[in-house]
Amino acid sequence: MKPHCFFIPLARVTRGALCLAFCLIVLFSTLWILKDVVFLSMVAHLPHQVGTRYDECTADARSNPNTRCPWPPKRVADLFNQQTGVYNLQLNPIVHKNERLPSATHWELLQFLYNGQNISGSELKQLVNIDSQVRMNGLEENYELYPQMMNVREAVKAIRLGEPVQSAPVNDPQLEVIRSPHYVCTNTNRKNVLDLVVLIKSCSTCFDNRANARRTYMQQKLWRNFRVQFAFVTGIPTEARRDKYDFDGVWIQPYNGKSQTNETTLEATQKLLQESDVHHDLLIGSFNDTYYNLTLKMMLTFRWTAVFCKHQASVYLFVDDDYSLVPSSVIRLIRKIPFTVRPYLNGGTAAPDLIVRHPSDSSSWGDRWSVSANELPWTRYPSYSSGAAYILGSELVIDAAIAMAFTRYYRLDDAYLGFVWNKLHSRVYTIRQMKHTMDNLTDPNEVITAPRIYVDKAMDWDTGVMYMSRL
């Protein structure tokens, strides 16, 4: 036998071993991928209370009265859920047991004072009507009756200190962050490192509006040495699955705005996530992005800002994505605001009107702003800025982010904010340079924010100079 013949069986064994090793690698790789898929599927169904350090702290505080869990927490990471891989911005405060609610006491007082006819309708409607008849000044609206009826400022103070509150919040849903802007509010342990943070309310499929903002007023060269950062806020694309909504007996046809894409929901979601991967300036919540979830979007915006941007800027500007900013005017305004008034500043675009739209008795159908008297018994809303654009101080944003948990959900976001301001005793001011229109204006310094159709027409975005003659 020739010498090389001894090596033939050995070669075959080697090839077989290599083949077996390759098959094992493929098998284990497949199992590893399947493990991740199964794990993610299981995580999606895990109870949300498991996962964050803040949850662990509040759980400990419920049995140990000396434990304090302030919100916002000192570290952003304390709100990160390792199991689900998302931030959870729910407050979930510690609640005193056996506390008698102010609403019960007030109802007893009204029953004692009132001797008129029975009033039909919801409990809130009865409460408001009877209260207006027994108060000395019955013409003055008493918005303190809007649920939750309690000392909200006291609750805000308690939660910021990590102390218990007198009753569980009525509006504290899971607020999970699917995507967070990478380069916005990253210096979490430093104060006043930014002059301004701009939060842009955007619909999930408004791709064109966001692209326009990036190539116009978001250009860094237009802001020179003014330290400003921008973030868009949106939810998850969804298909309209109802032909009508029933809000306490008032029927309203769906209104979700005008989509800027013809893709399916899945395709739009993929496109949104790709946009986030490219630009890193999107804050995406886990809720369906619909018109009647605008208040949920606002809650996410305030909670995220309170946690991630805490003290990094003294003021924040909130604006719709179909409005535009005039950088030079914004810079001039912000620099003029005294530092002493910035923390609790509350000013914005004048609201069109404060009228509560109740449908007529002859019809149960209304427009998108309609509301039943059972849901809102008042004829006017408390003061609020138009949601198109407004500026708030950093401390007020934190207070409002907490106060919303104790203010019953209402679908019209800017009007809802009026009830929040009332509970915080925060007076709302008009900033006259924030415009709904630029008709008949001649001085470019008169405009800070305005609808995009006006600003884009007048502005030279290469230089940042606005020519009013173009209007």
Image (cartoon, helix red, strand yellow):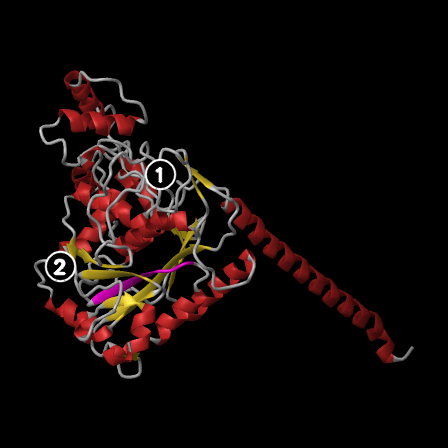
Which quadrant, please, contains the C terminus?
bottom left
Q: Could you tell me the amino acid type at mark 1? A: Pro
Residue 319 visible within the image: yes
User: What residue did someone put label 1 on?
Assistant: 359
User: What residue did someone put label 2 on?
Assistant: 342
Left/right placement of residue 171 relative to residue 6 reads left
Left/right placement of residue 261 relative to residue 154 reads right
Return the x and y of residue 363 as percentages of the image width and height: 41, 36
Of 453 and 52, nearer the camera is 453
Which quadrant, please, contains the N terminus?
bottom right
Kindly report which numbered mark, 2 or 1, lies closer to the viewer in this rendering. Answer: 1
Q: Residue furthest front?
A: 362
Question: Mainly helix, strand or loop, the magenta region?
Answer: strand
Determine crowd level at label 2: few under 14, some 14-19, many 20+ residues with C-alpha closer than 10 A: many
Is residue 73 a member of the stretch shown in magenta?
Answer: no
What is the C-alpha distance between the residues marked 2 and 1?
Answer: 40 Å
> Does label 2 or label 1 sit earlier along the sequence?
2
Return the x and y of residue 313 as percentages of the image width and height: 20, 63
Determine crowd level at label 1: few under 14, some 14-19, many 20+ residues with C-alpha closer than 10 A: some
Of 364 and 298, nearer the camera is 364
Label 2 residue SS: helix
Quarter of the image where one finds residue 437: bottom left
Give the residues in magenta.
196-203
Return the x and y of residue 48 as percentages of the image width and height: 42, 42
Of 219 and 417, nearer the camera is 417
Q: Could you tell me the amino acid type at mark 2? A: Arg
